[in-house]
Amino acid sequence: MNRAELDAIELMLRDLNTRHDEIRHRAAFRGCTRELLSLQQELVKYLMAKREGLSGRSGGV
């Protein structure tokens, strides 16, 4: 198990769950707010599954 990889996943999940008003404003201007939020949800699910897989291989963190 790579602790650095787990730490990076945790940081990315925190970032994805942070409200980034500038990016949301740009998405609204470009008409892709729904797609942006959908992609964000997809990335969160992927990272959570990857985190669980890494944690499972190590016997838990």
Image (spheres, rainbow, N blue to C red):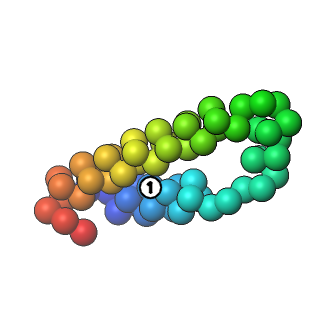
State how many labels appear.
1
From the viewer's side, name the closer residue of 34 and 7.
34
Location of the N terminus (image quadrant): bottom left
Image coordinates of residue 25 in percent, x first then y, are 82, 46
Toward the left, the furthest residue is 59
Toward the right, the furthest residue is 29
The residue shown at (77%, 47%) is 23
The residue shown at (40%, 55%) is 5
Q: Is residue 54 left or right of residue 57?
A: right
Q: Is residue 55 left or right of residue 39?
A: left
The residue shown at (75%, 47%) is 24
SS for callout 1: helix
Q: Is residue 13 left or right of residue 31?
A: left
Tell me if residue 9 comes above or below residue 25 in the rendering.
Answer: below
**Can the viewer see residue 8?**
no
Looking at the rendering, which quadrant does residue 56 occupy?
A: bottom left
Image coordinates of residue 58 in percent, x first then y, are 18, 59
**Can the viewer see residue 45?**
yes
Toward the bottom, the furthest residue is 61
Q: Residues within 10 Å of mark 1 (few under 14, many from 20)?
A: some
Image coordinates of residue 49 in percent, x first then y, are 31, 47
Residue for badge 1: 9
Image coordinates of residue 53 in percent, x first then y, are 24, 49
The residue shown at (24%, 69%) is 61
From the viewer's side, name the closer residue of 14 and 21.
21
Looking at the rendered structure, the kind of residue marked 1 is Ile
Tell me if residue 21 comes above or below residue 40 in the rendering.
Answer: below
